[in-house]
Image: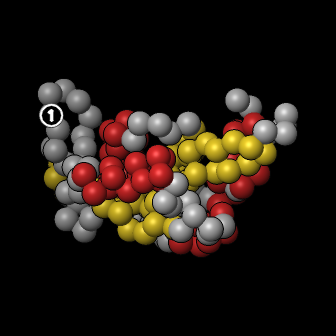
Amino acid sequence: MEILGFSVMVGGGSPAWVEVPEKSKSAFLELKRRKVHRYVIFKIDDRREEIVVEKTGAPGESYADFTASLPADDCRYAVYDLDFVSDDNCRKSKIFFISWSPSVSGIRAKTIYAVSRNQFRHELDGVHFEIQATDPDDMDLDVLRGRANRT
């Protein structure tokens, strides 16, 4: 299948996708199980064949460090492990899947990320919440805390 001049694989009537290598899945599992990372940022490689790890954040990095690592003009996927104190005063952790697609990014990038999002998201078992952001306000820390506290 071709979308906006680039090929996208389609299989068995399922939506279009790009491959998710084991290294990318492993980075997510390290965040989820071992708390090795605070966040993982993924990108679709230049050949548009795989979703690869672009950057990982150490456990001590802040949310501001995470948001500063996202490009202002290109799409990315990310997972963020939010530690917080709930309304009932319990320490909790929730994992967010964030689809970052800034309004100034190119139409090709927006399309391939949108087409691949659901398939990639379902590869990441254990995500609690999903956020689609086109502007930093869409994924403000207060937005994440509000979503996490509703559970």
Above or below 92: residue 54: below
Quadrant of the rendered image containing residue 52? bottom left
Q: Nearer the viewer, residue 38 or 101?
A: 38
Q: Nearer the viewer, residue 22 or 110?
A: 22
Above or below 92: residue 60: below
Residue in view at x 27 percent, y 65 percent: 45
> Which three-letter amino acid code belongs to the residue tagged 1?
Gly
Q: Secondary structure at mark 1?
A: loop
Horizontal relation, residue 33 to residue 1: left or right: right
Which quarter of the image is occupied by the N terminus?
top left
The residue most toward the front is: 34
Residue 28: percent from left, percent from top = 41, 51
Q: Nearer the viewer, residue 99 or 85?
A: 85
Residue 64 appears in the rendering: yes
Residue 70: percent from left, percent from top = 52, 68
Residue in view at x 76 percent, y 51 percent: 142
Packing grade of label 1 (10 A; few <14, some 14-19, many >=20) is few
Disc 1: which residue = 11
Residue in view at x 19 percent, y 65 percent: 47
Which quarter of the image is occupied by the C terminus?
top right
Residue in view at x 41 percent, y 64 percent: 106
Residue 81: percent from left, percent from top = 58, 51
Quadrant of the rendered image containing residue 63? bottom right
Above or below 149: residue 12: above
Q: How is the image coloured?
A: secondary structure
Horizontal relation, residue 108 to residue 147: left or right: left
